[in-house]
Every structure is written in structure tokens, then in C-alpha cells.
Image (cartoon, coloured by chain):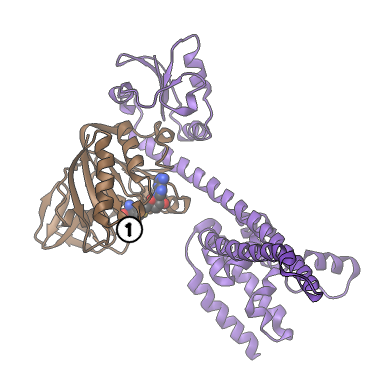
Amino acid sequence: MYLITKWFGTFICNKNRIKNKILFSKDEKEIVKKLLKINENKILPEEKKIVKNLKKIIVIEKRLQKIGEYKPSDPFFKKIEIKPEDFDYSEDLLHKATLLLAKNRVKEKLASEDLQVIQMVNALDDLIQTSNLLSERVNCWSAIPTSKEKIQPLQNVFSTVNNEIKSMEKQIDSDMEKIAPNMSKITGPLISARLLSIAGGLEKLATMPASTIQILGAEKAFFRFRKEGGKPPKHGVIFQNPYINRSPREIRGKIARVLATKISIATKADAFTKRDISKDLIKDLDKRIKEIKNL
Amino acid sequence: MKTAEKQGIFKEKNRIFTENLDSCKGLKVYNEKLVKHKGREFRSWNPYRSKLAAAILNGLNIEIKSNSKILYLGAATGTTVSHISDIVKDGSVYSVESSPVAVKKLIELSEKRKNIIPILGDANHPDRYSFLVPVVDLIYQDISQRNQAGIFISNIARYLKRSSNSILMVKARSIDVALKPNKAYNLVCSELENSGLKIKDKIDLKPYEKDHAAVIISN
Ligand SMILES: C[S@@+](CC[C@H](N)C(=O)[O-])C[C@H]1O[C@@H](n2cnc3c(N)ncnc32)[C@H](O)[C@@H]1O
């Protein structure tokens, strides 16, 4: 007996004949729910049900090896054709269901890609901190008369860490250019990665107001201001953008506000519409900054 | 336009075209040219953008019927897939691609082209899309990975109808950078033959694509 699952149902076959079947609902959303489970390597309740009390089940998917013997190259699977139209399932339904399935899975995959970036940003910060510590130690140690061999191992680690920093930055750059191309063009991939990391993901960042984006990374200063008064912080992570930190102090706040607005628009495109709007944004940003400087 | 048609592929001088699907009239997929002729709309098929077009211009002779079912491995954003979709207007192109970013574009394309079934998946694991893909008339693979022959063989074993053809686009440098392209192609061909496939043709993609060849097999 062979167990075969298609997008529209699960079947028990024997010598070119379908012996038993459980068909899925004809609602594309219901179908997608099942297909997502299959993609997660789960066994469907329908599959468990249909093999109940049957012996010697042969399966074509590794996923099903718990309920049958896995024989991917059994020629039977090519001989038997289970056609959706024979059961009144249309190609159109398959098309609709696979579109929905692909959309779902792409979204999931990309979401996990931004989780990767968050880890990389954290790892980068750890490496930078480590590098600073080691640099300090190496300097102190070298200041007193020391034989080369003694200090060499530490220096090796120091240079390994520094190389790792460079390669981590490169990886973050290339990942961010894929995940958030608009934002990366406006404020650089690394600052973008830090913003994404603090926000906890691209979609979260994309739903934040510009005023929040402007101070992301300056939360400590912001809470201090709320508690103790004084001046509110004008900018967080985005301060590292040369547009801001190369500008005269008095106009930095204004530029930060404009930049944050553009970043907010850019992330919305990256997370939702996926359109490349970076050229227009950059043009507009340059114009606004010129205006501010000429005031 | 004077066109000589062969199974959905239209030739004029040294250019080839496919006829745009009715559902996509006026729409371009990449920067191809749209040409109107006697009320029909044709899309120029750029051999510098699509290796299949390059192979056809270099003499690839293969039958693709309008109702064929095709398994396409390494669909990317769908440049070549879109032309195949024009050709198999009553068939289907099951398009497998592993990069989610590329699949996003492929999904957009599939919204307008009902015969494209987009699949986010890894061609190394034909198991994982067996619930979507039936036995097909042709497998087309364009994946520049070292184990491309192995991927091709396992998908053929699983999905290719008996006595059918398949096309593998080989990038010499992804087989072995140190090897001369011809040696790399031969290496791939002997791996295919060892698994019981017959090599029908080998077409260099020069001048459109450097160090690439199309290998045509039958099972
Ligand atoms: C050279 S491109 C294909 C171009 C496409 N055939 C065209 O002409 O429009 C190769 C594609 O294969 C994809 N790829 C690489 N390894 C893969 C795998 N194991 N499974 C599926 N796709 C893969 C890559 O993401 C890339 O998009």
C-alpha cells in the first residue's frame, strides 16, 4: 500500500488503483493551512487517519517516515497519476493556494532573516567591546618590558577579533541591502541594522512614528529626561549618520527630524509595498537639508 | 514582422519572441520589447538575459507543447519563466526557487500569469514539493551550484515522465574554477550518463553567456 498526499487530499493506492482517499476542503485558505503544516514537516491528521489499521505502508516523503517505509525512488509513484481534475479540483484553485502559501512562507522566511540581523548586530557589538578590552590590555602589557612570545597569543586573538568585526559588518551590509533596500540607501546598512535591531524587527520599525525612530537608541537619555527634566534627547542611533554628525550642532535636531521622517517612509516601503523609492527619498532629503542649512 | 513559428517560439531574422499571454497585454516583465503584429502582441526574448533564449538561438531543438507541464528549478525572479509561461499557455510551470527575495518577485509575476505555480523551496529536496508537483513533460534547471548534476538527477528520477527531455544549464566555473569549461561540461555529462540518462545535445551559449552550456538529456 502506498500513501500519497497531494495538495487536494491524501490517498491510499495499490496497483494503480486508488483504494481510499480523504479529500481536503475546496477553500484555498483551508488548503494553505494544511500545506503549511506539510512544510513544517508535520504529519496531517488526515494522513494518520487514513493509514489507521493498515500495514506495510510505503511513503514517498521523508516527512511521513513515521507512518510508513520511506522509498523515494519506488517507480510506483511515477506510474500512478492522481489528477486534481478527476476529483473536481481546478488548476485555478491550485494557483490561488500556492500563491497564498508562497506569500506566507516568504514572509516567514524574511521575518526570520531580520531576526538573524538582530543577532548579528548584537554579536558585532560584543566583538567591538572585546576588541576594545583586548586593545587596552595589549597596550598596557606592551608598555612594560615583555618578551614577544608571551604577548603573541593575545595579539593573535586581538587580530582575529578585528577581522571578525570586518566580516560581520560586510555580512550585515549585504543582508540589509536585501531585507531593507530603501532604508539602507538612505542611512546606510549598518545604522539601518541597528534601528531594526532596537525596534525588534522590520515590521515593528515600519509601524513606529518618525518621532520614535528619531530617538531609537537614546532610550536611556529619554527616560532620564522624563524623570529628571532637562533637555530631551534629539537623536539616537541615527545621530551616527554623517548628515547629522557633520552638521553644525544647532541644526542637528532639525536634520534628525527630517531624516527620521524619510527613514519611516523608507521602512514602510521595505516592509509592505516593497517598491524601490530610494531615489525620490534621497532627492527630497538632500533638498530639505539644504533648506535647513540655508535658514 | 515576419514570423516563423515553432511551438510558440517566433523567429524574425536573428531575434526570437514569445506571444504575450492575453492576461498580460501591454505588460513587460523585465526590459524586453513589446511588438504588435496583426493584433497579436509579442515579447522579445533577450539571449543576454535568458540562457534558454541563448540556447535556442544557438540551435537548441526541443519541443514544448502549449499544454506541457514543466518543472523549473532555480526560477529566480522569473525572467525565463515568463517566456516559458507564454509558450505553455494551457500548461503549467512549477517554479522552484530558494531565495525568498526572488520568490517575492516571482509571486508578483504569478499573480498575472495563472500557469505559473511559484514554490519557495530547495531543489536539493525534491521530497518537499511532491504534494504540489506532478509528473512533468520537461525539467529545466538553472542553478549555479557545485552539485547541480546531482540535483538534476534526483529531480528527474522523481518527476520526469518516461522518454522525455530535460535541459540543464551548466556554469563551468561553479563545477570547478580551475577546470577548462569543456572539461567541466564533460564531467557533468558523464555524471548524468552514469545515472542512466542519455545526452542528446550540448550547446555552448557563446557569445551570449561566457563559460556556460546547455546540456539536453532524455531519460
Ligand atoms: C542563475 S539564477 C537563475 C536565473 C533564471 N533561470 C532566469 O533565467 O531567469 C540561479 C537561481 O537559482 C537559485 N538557487 C540556488 N540554489 C538553489 C536551490 N538549491 N534550490 C532552488 N533554487 C536555487 C538562486 O537563488 C538563483 O535565483
Residue farthest toward the right in the current orientation of the protein: A228
What chain does badge 1 belong to? B
Compare residues A96 and B190 and report the one nearer the observer. Answer: B190
Q: Position of residue A172 (x, y in %)?
A: 58, 61
Question: Which of the 4 quarters of the picture holds residue B171?
Answer: bottom left
Q: Is residue A256 visible?
A: yes
Q: In the rendered picture, chain A carries what hue?
A: purple
Q: Residues within 10 Å of mark 1 (few under 14, many from 20)?
A: some
Residue at 44 percent across and 27 percent down: it is A61
Residue at 53 percent across and 47 percent down: it is A109
Residue at 85 percent across and 69 percent down: it is A225
Residue A228 drawn above or below residue B27: below
Q: What residue would you read off at disc 1?
A: B29
Q: In the rendered picture, chain B carries what hue?
A: brown
Q: Is residue A33 left or right of residue B191?
A: right
Residue B95 drawn above or below residue A136: above
Q: Position of residue A70 (x, y in %)?
A: 44, 23
Question: Which of the 4 quarters of the picture holds residue A232?
Answer: bottom right
User: How many numbered dots are placed on residues in this image?
Assistant: 1
